[in-house]
């Protein structure tokens, strides 16, 4: 088994015992460790491989800048900038294979920046006293981050926190040894969707796209999935995107916590990535099932999907608002952009006679979407439902046209 090197990050002036314990577990399992000290005021008992002075300098500062700031938030942001830059440099040079960071709210804030600076496929573990907390917004989480709750570890080692720290050490080393990093062997198409009970196009599209030489990644558009989709689109990971479930745009618009942020449905367009967009589940707003309905949706029909997630049907006026928001996002595209509008419905439940059928609402959306679609986006009005074979055929025809024109190249 080939050894891997884990970068262990934390404030060694206050967490030396815990960080040293983690490093010892990794080394006992045959791994190697590089230590990074992101302290500001104090010093570790044993010098770290990457000192706080080196960290601050990597971000264009001196440690005195952090000390003289007189504000712990400003100081830690200085250190976060340097830690992220230094970690990215070490990773690019092949000197580290994974990162494990430890902290409370301060250390977690910094750790998220460090993890965000590393590419997909580099194991990223954060041991945090606020893991899984609503304090952490979705837009701070990289696509493949792992978090472990640091229970009972606020001050000093004990048998409770050793259980968490040792698991984290084993997990990050195991991940570094086992990970299959993206090889980019075939061009990748990013697609958004939901489960097959509501949206089914990926069942037909995935084998067809693979037969054309593409790899296909389907993202579950429930907040975190859309966040990962946008992040990878911004990095240029996709040869083209099929963004057929932009429901997170409506979630954000209507005040739901299940949001991919205000920039959902923009990264591919801004990056010039060829995009095909369709309004799958545009008419539903998902919200956290164990929380109250967002105030903007109070009094509207609610469908409980499970104990975690419920959906509210949009009114005709809200659907028009959704269409205008989508139009504004399409207008940001700098590359080829196509909008497919299925005129018979956009999820399995809104077919005529279905439980969520609303012909008036669908007509309102389609009318507003046609008006809001920018002239830079080609619009296809499709006499079909989004789950009909005709929809998948239309999407493939657009992609095949791009391939014929040399806009998109298959593998």
Image (cartoon, rainbow, N blue to C red):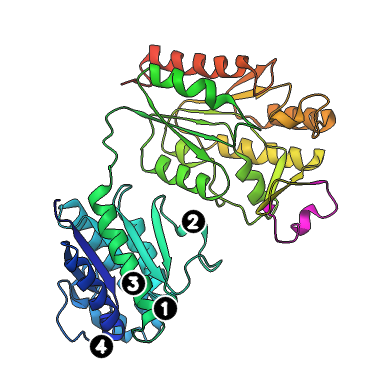
Distance of mark 4 from mark 3, alpha carbons? 23 Å
Residue 11 is tagged as none
Q: Secondary structure at mark 1?
A: helix
Q: Which residue is mark 2?
A: 139
Closer to us: mark 1 or mark 2?
A: 2
Residue nearest the viewer, comparing 191 with 275: 191
Locate the C terminus by quadrant. Answer: top left
Q: Is residue 56 above or below residue 220?
A: below
Q: Does residue 256 show up magenta in the picture? A: no
Distance of mark 4 from mark 2, alpha carbons? 31 Å
Q: Which residues are magenta?
A: 287-302
Residue occupying image coordinates x 52% and y 50%: 224
Distance of mark 2 from mark 3, alpha carbons? 26 Å
Q: Which residue is mark 4?
A: 42
Q: Earlier in the sequence, mark 1 or mark 3?
A: 1
Q: Secondary structure at mark 4?
A: loop
Q: Does residue 292 show up magenta in the picture? A: yes
Q: Which residue is mark 3?
A: 165
Percent position (x, y) of residue 263?
Answer: 53, 48
């Amino acid at each position: 088994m080939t050894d891997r090197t884990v970068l262990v990050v934390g404030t060694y002036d206050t967490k030396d015992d815990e960080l040293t314990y983690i490093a010892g577990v990794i080394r006992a399992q045959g791994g190697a460790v590089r230590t990074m000290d992101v302290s500001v005021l104090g010093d570790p008992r044993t010098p770290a491989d990457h000192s706080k002075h080196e960290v601050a300098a990597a971000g264009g500062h001196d440690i005195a800048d952090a000390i003289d700031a007189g504000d712990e938030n400003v100081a830690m942001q200085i250190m976060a900038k340097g830690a992220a830059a230094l970690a990215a440099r070490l990773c690019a040079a092949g000197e580290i294979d994974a990162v494990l960071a430890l902290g409370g709210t301060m250390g977690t804030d910094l750790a998220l920046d460090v993890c965000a600076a590393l590419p997909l496929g580099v194991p990223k573990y954060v041991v945090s006293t606020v893991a899984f907390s609503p304090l952490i917004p979705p837009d701070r989480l990289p696509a493949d981050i792992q978090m472990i709750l640091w229970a009972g570890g606020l001050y000093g080692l004990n048998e409770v926190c050793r259980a968490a720290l040792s698991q984290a050490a084993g997990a990050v080393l195991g991940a570094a040894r086992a990970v299959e990093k993206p090889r980019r062997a075939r061009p990748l198409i990013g697609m958004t969707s939901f489960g097959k009970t509501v949206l089914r196009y990926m069942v037909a599209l995935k084998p067809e796209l693979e037969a054309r030489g593409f790899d296909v990644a389907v993202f579950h558009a429930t907040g975190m999935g859309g966040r990962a989709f946008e992040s990878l689109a911004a990095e240029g990971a996709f040869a083209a995107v099929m963004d057929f479930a932009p429901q997170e745009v409506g979630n954000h618009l209507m005040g739901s916590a299940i949001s991919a942020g205000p920039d959902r449905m923009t990264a591919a367009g801004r990056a010039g990535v060829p995009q095909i967009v369709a309004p799958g589940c545009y008419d539903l707003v998902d919200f956290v099932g164990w929380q109250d309905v967002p105030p903007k949706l109070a009094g509207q029909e609610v469908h409980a999907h499970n104990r975690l997630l419920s959906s509210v049907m949009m009114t005709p006026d809200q659907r028009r608002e959704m269409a205008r928001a989508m139009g504004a996002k399409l207008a940001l595209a700098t590359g080829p952009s196509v909008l497919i509008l299925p005129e018979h419905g956009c999820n399995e439940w809104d077919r005529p006679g279905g439980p969520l059928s609303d012909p008036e609402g669908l007509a309102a959306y389609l009318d507003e979407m046609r008006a809001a679609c920018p002239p830079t986006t080609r619009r296809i009005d499709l006499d079909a439902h989004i789950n009909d074979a005709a929809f998948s055929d239309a999407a493939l025809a657009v992609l095949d046209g791009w391939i014929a024109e040399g806009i998109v190249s298959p593998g």
